[in-house]
Image (cartoon, rainbow, N blue to C red):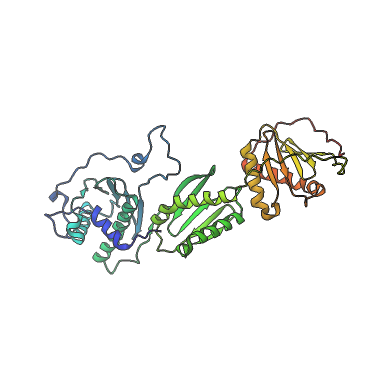
Amino acid sequence: MKRIFRSKMVTVLAVILIVLLPSCQTTEPVDIADVPAIVLPTLPAAAEAAAPEAGETQPEGEAAVSNPALTLDYLGYTVSVTAADGYAEIIYPEAAVTVSDAQAFLLYEAEKYGDEVSGVVYDVSVPGTIMLTYPEGIPEETRYGFASSFLEDIVEYVEMLYPAEAPAPAEISVPAETICYEVLGYTAEFTVEDGKTILALPPVVLESDVDGFFAYEVAKYGSYVDGIRYSYTGNAVELTYPESISRADVKANLPAFVDDIAEYAAMLAVPAAEPVADVVVEAVEEPAVPEAEVISYDVLGYTAEFTVEDCRTTLALPPVVIESDVDGFFAYEVAKYGSYVDGIRYSYTGDAVELTYPESISRADVKANLPAFVDDIAEYAATLAVPAAEPVAEAVEEPAV
């Protein structure tokens, strides 16, 4: 993952923020009447600027760009910075800070950073608000660094003016960000905070799936992921990482993380078996093959009819079940039972599923496990929110032959 160091954040502030006022080189309060106000054009609100056009949708797999908004709670007052594309808005407590105070702080910043901050325009004509304009196209993480450094400089400036009254360094609160991606038909929702990311899980994902995936990640990246920890909470995975990994680093690596999820899931997919040829038995030389047995169960208002033979079972499907449902269910079975189902193959024929298994699995074994198989169908269907069928006439079970 990339690293963003403090020196870069200072450079960010130097490039973007403060207006250099060549004619005013003093930290003494400056009367607004003595400095011509620079009137900016009407700017759209940050939310409006980021909103898509009507009918426009977010491209799949891409996260929306946001405008970093940070707040500073200090000495009982609140200052906020919203760093949008091309401009920033700083809101300060009008009742406690005069326009001259705001100008004095900007002069302090100008003297601190010198010629490096030349060219950014500011407007303090509205009490309680400072508007800054700068070039468009600056990356979000760079604007985030500007906002953070700006608030830190406020604390530094106040402590310089009132060293005896300055409290402990104020904590800057950064709201969590929610970023979504589409993975295998599900929505992967990440809640990103400083030092922590939470990934919400769909019901189909089990703890063993989570453990398997992160073992796969460690094998793939090795020491590159040292210091990153995960915990399974039932409906989510919580990732924690060292302070050296910034929020911007995490967001930049989310697309690769999502690709790894799809890559790992593909490894677990169960391939469809080749069609099995019918076994021709010569009655003269071989013992007669027992006739097939038909066994029925009710599942979600439908009748699950199994035709059980030696080494093969056929399950008739209602029209509502499609091939992707069948593939998803057997992938769910493999994830649940692992090597216990080795050697069992299935094929989809349109209106039925044919299961074949080794000779070591007897017909009696199959019949004994059918109730658990039926329960798994209902359990998997519940994860997909499959609607139950309308009530039908009670099915008459055919007697076993």
The residue most toward the front is 285
Location of residue 275 (image quadrant): top right
Location of residue 184 (image quadrant): top right
Residue 147 relative to residue 190: left or right: left
**Residue 378 can be seen in this image:** no
Residue 271 image offset from top left, x and y in percent: 62, 45
The residue most toward the left is 23
Q: Looking at this view, is 369 or 358 the one in front? A: 358
| Quadrant placement of the N terminus | bottom left
| Residue in the picture at 76% in, 42% down | 313
Residue 368 image offset from top left, x and y in percent: 80, 48
Q: Looking at this view, is 10 or 396 the one in front? A: 396
Residue 259 relative to residue 378: left or right: left
Q: Looking at this view, is 28 or 176 the one in front? A: 176
Residue 174 image offset from top left, x and y in percent: 39, 55
| Quadrant placement of the C terminus | top right
**Residue 356 can be seen in this image:** yes
Q: Is residue 291 above or below residue 28?
A: above
Q: How many marks?
A: 0
Residue 63 image offset from top left, x and y in percent: 42, 45
